[in-house]
């Protein structure tokens, strides 16, 4: 199967200025995302995992151009997203949608479900006016809600149902790419499983591409085709799910995988417990960013920042210590 | 009762009922909970949002906001003394001294305008009548004990200067300062990243071994439970539906809800095409179904399940289940359940 690139990200940088002093001058920058390049292929699920502050959400927001990146290039099909004007960007948003973490905060409490969905349909003009009502019922059915739910308000629903409304809203405009930013993190496990199943079903049905941002490696393993691990604004490892989970190369990926409490193999594993906290992204360490916490650190790691190198066709890692 | 351990019970909760009286009606958040915490053991209280697990912990500490909440029945015996009947003054002497608690959100449970050293010292001055200087020295020791680097310097910092993991360590230091007999940890690692979570769980285990206290961990994360607990109590809709040893949890869970929870977890060790979700959602606490609260979502529910609530009955040594399937009254047509007893 040939893979067509849907989104290509080249050297993306996102620095947020820190203002200080009485003149509100920029005194420093938070380097949230620092030179990241990757590709999302059509129809796949690419996951970004990492801990808080690693830049995974910022990367997702940059692709949607919810923030203005500092530098880099993002191509969606053949369009350079960062050069689009407001009108073209709005047209493009039809193709790329987002589901946020908090199903409580991302729905307008004063609108009924019908109004919420209708607004999306009106803005993007995807369906003629007279067919909108039918389309809304169809959307609700797709996400497992009843037609009579359309006239209720968000507060009348449980967390899982609200997340379903959020999903219905993104589907309303027939998107190609959906960015799921911690989309199931706020849900209880029994409900989380329902929503994950729904996302998978919809992907098959509509040939959707997902950029799935999560800190939960169990969820990521379940839903992804490829996985990208980020640490302090950089990609440390990216690869095919199977290869990455079964044969992790980067010490950080290994530590991350071993840190998850795993019921099925409680006794028979060595746990790598990392010392210390993630350094501040304002002043990241010299050389490899993981060098301050890495159990295998060498002098070379503190000197030069390792580049991403391919260890197999679909698996790249950024570490000086991995022999290729 | 469960697990006839050599160790004596420290905390016994008997038929605890905490209800909330609101304009919308009476919410029976905790509706008849029984469990025993033995000396030196770790008990996990597991359940999803709204199952009443946090209200149970607040009830033990007599921290239920009243109105609207009230403990309407049951006993909480701490070393033979019923805390439900204790006066406010007695409770103040127990809380933070003999029974301590760690909450989920380390940012909101620390006071933002005091240094962390002062906040630890306060506990010591209050409960152990230490002087200012002694208390400060002990506070610095506590920070060292919980593994904070350069504790002298950190003690003088305010909470916002610390990371999430460090703040949770400070919370643990406060909770441990008086060497409590019982530590209640309400979702202690939920707000933390996995690598930091691993550090904190390891720390709690170490401190337990050093100080010999009993821990009750309240969590929704079955992984955390299997990693840290000796015994597990699973709650659903205000009642305990199953109690068993943590080792059995993933291999020998009997209640359909426990099995459902385990099956809905995405596994790291195997590929699954589709997760086995539990259908439907948790019932509203104002409109509890008649009979077993889980019956509307249960794949095996029979007639009796919709009419009467089963008792929590001994199933095996160290194993109690609240489910009609395992009773002589069970006449359901579904026999697959018994055979498919293993959840995984």
Image (cartoon, coloured by chain):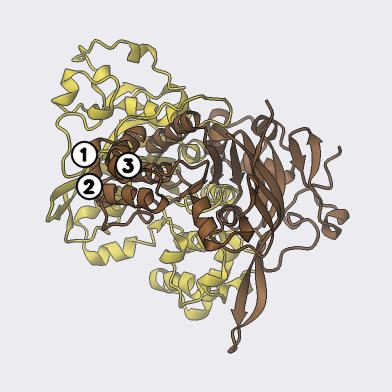
Task: Say if labels 1 and 2 share a chain.
Answer: yes
Residue A203: where, in percent of width, then height? 49, 33
Question: Which colour represents chain A?
Answer: brown
Secondary structure at badge 2 equals: loop
Both on one chain, marks 3 and 2? yes
Looking at the rendered structure, the secondary structure element under dot 1 is helix
Q: Which chain corresponds to the colour yellow?
A: B
> Mark 2 — residue?
A152
A10 in relation to B287, above or below:
below
Whether labels 1 and 3 share one chain: yes
State which tag comes first along the sequence, 3 or 2.
Answer: 2
User: Would you say the residues marked 1 and 2 are in contact, meaning their CB atoms lie under 8 Å apart?
Assistant: yes
- Count neighbours of disc 3 (C-alpha within 10 A) and say few if under 14, some if 14 to 19, many if 20 or more: many
Q: Which mark is residue A161?
A: 3
Rate crowding at label 2 as few (under 14), some (14 to 19) or many (20 or more) other CA atoms within 10 Å. some
Instruction: Please give left or right for residue B147 compared with residue B127 in the image.
Output: right
Residue A148 has which mark? 1
- Mark 1 vs 3, N-terminal side: 1
Expressed as whole percent of the image width and height from the top left, the position of residue B138 reads 54, 70
Q: Which residue is at 53% across, 51% downward? A: A92
* Disc 1 versus disc 3: nearer the observer: 1
In this view, the residue farthest toward the bottom is A22
* Chain holding disc 2: A
Give the alpha-carbon distance from disc 1 to disc 3, as whole Å.
13 Å
């Amino acid at each position: 199967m040939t893979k067509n690139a849907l989104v290509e990200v080249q050297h993306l940088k996102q620095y947020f200025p820190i203002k200080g002093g009485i003149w509100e001058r920029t005194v420093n920058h938070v380097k949230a995302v620092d030179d990241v390049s990757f590709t999302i292929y059509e129809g796949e699920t690419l996951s970004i995992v990492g801990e808080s502050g690693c830049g995974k959400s910022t990367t997702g927001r940059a692709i949607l151009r919810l923030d203005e990146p500092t530098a880099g290039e993002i191509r969606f099909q053949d369009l350079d997203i960062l050069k689009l004007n407001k009108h073209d960007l709005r047209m493009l948003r039809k193709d790329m949608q987002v589901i946020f973490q908090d199903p409580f905060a991302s729905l307008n409490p004063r609108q009924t479900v019908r109004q919420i969905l209708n607004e999306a349909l009106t803005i993007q003009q995807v369906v003629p006016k007279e067919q909108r009502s039918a389309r809304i019922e169809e959307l609700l059915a797709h996400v497992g809600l009843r037609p009579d739910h359309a006239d209720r308000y968000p507060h009348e629903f449980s967390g899982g149902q609200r997340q379903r409304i959020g999903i219905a809203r993104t589907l309303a405009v027939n998107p190609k790419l959906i960015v799921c930013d911690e989309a199931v993190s706020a849900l209880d496990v029994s409900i989380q499983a329902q929503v994950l199943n729904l996302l998978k079903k919809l992907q098959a049905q509509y040939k959707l591409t997902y950029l799935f941002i999560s800190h939960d490696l169990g969820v990521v393993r379940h839903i992804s085709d490829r996985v990208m691990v980020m640490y302090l604004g950089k990609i440390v490892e990216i690869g095919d799910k199977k290869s990455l989970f079964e044969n992790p190369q980067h010490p950080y990926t290994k530590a991350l995988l071993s840190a998850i409490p795993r019921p099925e193999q409680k006794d028979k594993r060595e746990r790598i417990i990392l010392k210390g906290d993630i350094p501040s992204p304002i002043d990241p360490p010299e050389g490899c960013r993981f060098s301050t916490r890495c159990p295998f650190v060498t002098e070379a790691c503190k000197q030069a920042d390792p580049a991403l190198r391919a260890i197999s066709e679909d698996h790249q890692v950024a570490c000086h210590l991995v022999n290729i | 009762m469960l697990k006839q351990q050599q160790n004596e019970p420290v905390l016994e909760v008997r038929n605890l009922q905490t209800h909330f009286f609101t304009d919308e009606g009476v919410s029976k958040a905790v509706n008849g909970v029984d469990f025993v915490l033995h000396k030196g053991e770790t008990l996990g209280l597991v359940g999803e949002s709204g199952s009443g697990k946090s209200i149970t912990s607040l009830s033990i500490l007599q921290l239920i906001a009243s109105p609207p909440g009230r403990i309407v029945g049951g006993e909480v015996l701490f070393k033979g003394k019923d805390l439900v009947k204790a006066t406010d003054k007695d409770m103040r002497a127990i809380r933070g001294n003999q029974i301590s608690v760690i909450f989920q959100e380390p940012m909101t449970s620390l006071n933002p305008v005091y240094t962390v050293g002062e906040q630890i010292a306060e506990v010591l001055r209050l409960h152990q009548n230490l002087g200012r200087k002694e208390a400060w020295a002990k506070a610095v020791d506590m920070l060292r004990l919980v593994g904070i680097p350069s504790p002298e310097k950190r003690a003088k910092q305010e909470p916002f200067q610390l990371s999430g993991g460090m703040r949770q360590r400070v919370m643990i230091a406060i909770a441990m300062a008086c060497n409590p007999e019982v530590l209640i940890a309400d979702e202690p690692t939920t707000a933390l990243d996995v690598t930091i979570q691993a550090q904190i769980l390891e720390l709690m285990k170490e401190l337990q071994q050093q100080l010999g206290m009993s821990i009750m961990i309240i969590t929704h994360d079955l992984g955390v439970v299997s990693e840290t607990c000796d015994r597990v109590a699973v709650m659903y809709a205000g009642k305990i539906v199953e109690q068993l040893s943590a080792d059995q949890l993933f291999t020998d869970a009997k209640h359909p809800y426990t099995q459902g929870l385990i099956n809905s977890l995405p596994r790291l060790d195997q590929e699954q095409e589709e997760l086995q979700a539990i259908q439907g959602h948790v019932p509203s606490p104002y409109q509890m179904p008649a009979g077993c609260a889980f019956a509307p979502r249960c794949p095996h529910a029979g007639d009796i399940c919709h009419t009467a609530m089963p008792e929590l009955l001994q199933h095996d040594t160290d194993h109690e289940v609240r489910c009609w399937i395992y009773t002589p009254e069970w006449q359901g047509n579904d026999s697959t359940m018994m055979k498919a007893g293993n959840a995984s």
